[in-house]
Image (tube, rainbow, N blue to C red):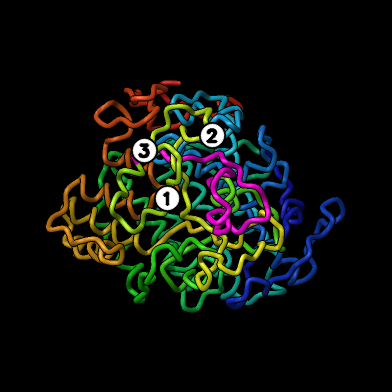
Amino acid sequence: MKINRHIIWALCAVVAIGSSSCVGDLDVEPNDPNTKLTLNTKTEWDGYFARLYWNFLDDTDNLVKTSDGGAGSFTRCHFNLQELCADECIISQKWNNPGYNTLNFANWTNNNEWVYAAFTREFFMAKMCAEFIRDIQAGGTEFYDGDEIAARVAEARVIRSYAYWCMIDLFGRGPWIDETSVTGAIPPTYDRQQLFDAVVAELRDAIPHVKWAAQQAYGRVSREAAYMLLAKLYLNAEVYTGTPMWSQCAEACRQVLSTGIQLAPEYKYLFCASNDKYVGNGEILWAVPQQQGRFTTWGGTTYLTCACWVESAPAEVLRRLNSGDTPWSGVRLRPELSRALKGDKRRLIYEGTYQENVDDLSGFDANSCGYMLIKYTNTTEDDYFNAAGNNNNGTAMSNTDYPLFRLADTYLMLAECQLRGVNCDGLAYLNKVRERAGMPAVAALTDDVVLHERQCELYMEGQRRSDLIRFNRFTGNNYVWSWKGGVLEGSYIAPSRSLYAIPYQYVETVGQNTGY
């Protein structure tokens, strides 16, 4: 894919990234992409930098064409690829868009539009970060001192590493591009081991130049978040490379904890419209900021609110959604998730008159297609149930920041490291997570305990597929769930399903994974 490096930045509607905790600090107007070929002011450079972060939400750039207009944002398509194929949620057939059913059933092919959107977004994000690094090192010295250039370069490298982590996890191969790549040339294809090695090296080199959360601007990646990304790579190293790296994972997690960041006191408030108070130097180590009136996106938490709430729910319940749009009634919960959360106060699920089972995927609005997720809301902590009845300014756009990494996950990763033989107090950290949830402490760690706790804490946060793969519960038939393999009672799926197909649009240059 050939991308004009000075034009793409100007396509953005600038996001919330600034020099303090206020969302509106960096209020930059995009320039006309047909005429703006050079960057002449600090404001323009700030806009270019902001565009790297906006890539997580942008679905207005016409980069990805999907049957559901505006749905191809990074956050939305990656959520779909992690959650719809696993045991937590399903898309009802009300939407009837191409690609959803094959994700629901874990029997996708190489022409699935969400698989294509995810791969395209990953490469685009990596490409744009590489261009920014090259450009700011060449032309940013007029506007920033050396320390600030180094910090912005390091952040761009972390964002690029995040995109490549997704590529490693979902696809296991892809085109490698960095600031030395030649524009217009076909980049080399790296296999999973090569991508892993390159991204780990990139992160380890960049992390010392990223600011700690206490000194970092709201919405920008912190050093703690960068260590969390490194820990995620190590956590899955045995899956990615065949070589476990549990000690390295635990050490990266210790670095996340080193500055004393604490869990938020109340779980449900991490997913409401005032969750920005926990972002950065709080439990949400890294989030994608969202604010009404400053962007339009059908991804992020706009998707996780509107899509998950069901229009037939009572008005007093829908008031908690606090949206100016009719709920989309698309995402419904599989019974396996509902049952896993029984008796747990983290169970942010509305049952109403709906049926727990998902026997009839066409019964989106009646009683036959699963419970409703109410984990993500557009109300605030001080009026969580929207007693005031505010109408959310008449817009469907969400005010809730999209959490990428949370500290509770760090704690549970340490528990997994202890389970795999590392001395790191992982059991104590897992019980801290359970204590906040009002759950009794567990006495010992097992695969079942850790995987169950990860689901109860991190459900519907885009983690489940990767967790099931790591615990050998995704492919095969030693664990089945509703509609796995395309049948209601669940069935075997092939080991090759642990990787997605390379979209047919890229096969000529990237190749294809085994089994497709």
Characterize the local packing of mark 3: few (<14), some (14-19) or many (20 or more) Cα atoms within 10 angstroms.
many
Q: Quarter of the image containing the N terminus? A: top right
| Location of residue 14 with respect to 481 vertically, above or below | below
Whether tag 1 and tag 2 are in contact, CB under 8 A, the answer is no
Q: Which residue is mark 1?
A: 349
Dot 1 amino acid type: Ile
Please indicate, yes or no, whether residue 276 appears anywhere in the rendered image: yes
| Position of residue 493 measured from the top left corner of the image (x, y, whole percent) | 35, 24
Q: Quadrant of residue 346?
A: bottom left
Residue 460 x %, y %: 43, 48
Mark 2: few, some, or many residues within 10 Å (few <14, many ≥20)? many
How would you rate the neighbour count of disc 1 (Cα within 10 Å): few for under 14, some for 14-19, many for 20 or more? some
Residue in view at x 36 percent, y 38 percent:
335
Residue under pointer 2: 364
Residue position marked by numbered label 3 in the rendering: 335
Is residue 170 visible to us here?
Answer: no
Magenta stretch: dominant SS? loop
Amino acid type assigned to the residue bearing label 3 in the image? Pro
The boundaries of the magenta stretch are 308-336
Circles 3 and 2, Cβ within 8 Å, touching? The answer is no
| Alpha carbons under labels 1 and 2: distance apart | 16 Å
**In this rendering, position of residue 219 left or right of residue 342:** right
